[in-house]
Amino acid sequence: QRIIVTDQPFNGYYQSIDYAYWRRDEAGPALVPLTTMQVKAEIARPEDNEIIRANSKYLVKGAAWTAGAIVTKVEVSCDAGKSWGEATLNGEATENAWRLWEFEWQTPSPGGYTLMARATDSRGRMQPMERDANGGTYMISHCLPIEVEVRL
């Protein structure tokens, strides 16, 4: 085993191709290495395809994060992004740190529902609804749907 120290950028496959995204501007497209996390919230509970009891209170939980700022708000949608309610942020707000959150959902009548979460940070950046096709596979920061079934 050894460690190699260099004053030059390492251009290995993962560092220069896989952990990179396409930046497109007036200078033309350029493959740029990933360096910071995007603002993002994820739902940890419920799991995708979970069955939830109708007409009850269900605590949706998750985590949110960002880079160079603090998470100031998380919103949850229980109707595939048509409407949003504000989640409760837990713990102290710290720059560059995860923020746990929870949202009390009064489950409606039986049926299928799509839950989503989105975060906003102190720099005003909000998690996008759509995936950025230039982002590659490691820069997936858009709102991801969680499908649940509500039953009696």
Image (cartoon, rainbow, N blue to C red):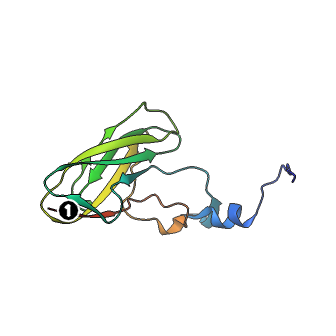
At x 63%, y 61%, the residue is: 19
Indicate the position of residue 62 as horizontal and vertical percent values.
38, 48
Indicate the position of residue 44 as horizontal and vertical percent values.
39, 52
**Can residue 137 be seen in this snapshot?**
yes
Label 1 crowd (10 A; few <14 / some 14-19 / many >=20): some
Q: Which residue is mark 1?
A: 150
Q: Indicate whether 95 appears above or below 53.
A: above
138 sits to left or right of 65: right
Indicate the position of residue 131 as horizontal and vertical percent values.
43, 65
Indicate the position of residue 134 as horizontal and vertical percent values.
52, 67
Q: Nearer the viewer, residue 60 or 39?
A: 60
At x 15%, y 57%, the residue is: 54
* Quadrant in the rendering for residue 11: bottom right
At x 40%, y 41%, the residue is: 100
Q: Nearer the viewer, residue 7 or 106?
A: 106
Quarter of the image with the N terminus is bottom right
17 sits to left or right of 126: right
Task: Give SS at disc 1.
Answer: strand
Quarter of the image with the C terminus is bottom left
At x 45%, y 37%, the residue is: 70
Q: Indicate whether 91 appears above or below 86.
A: above
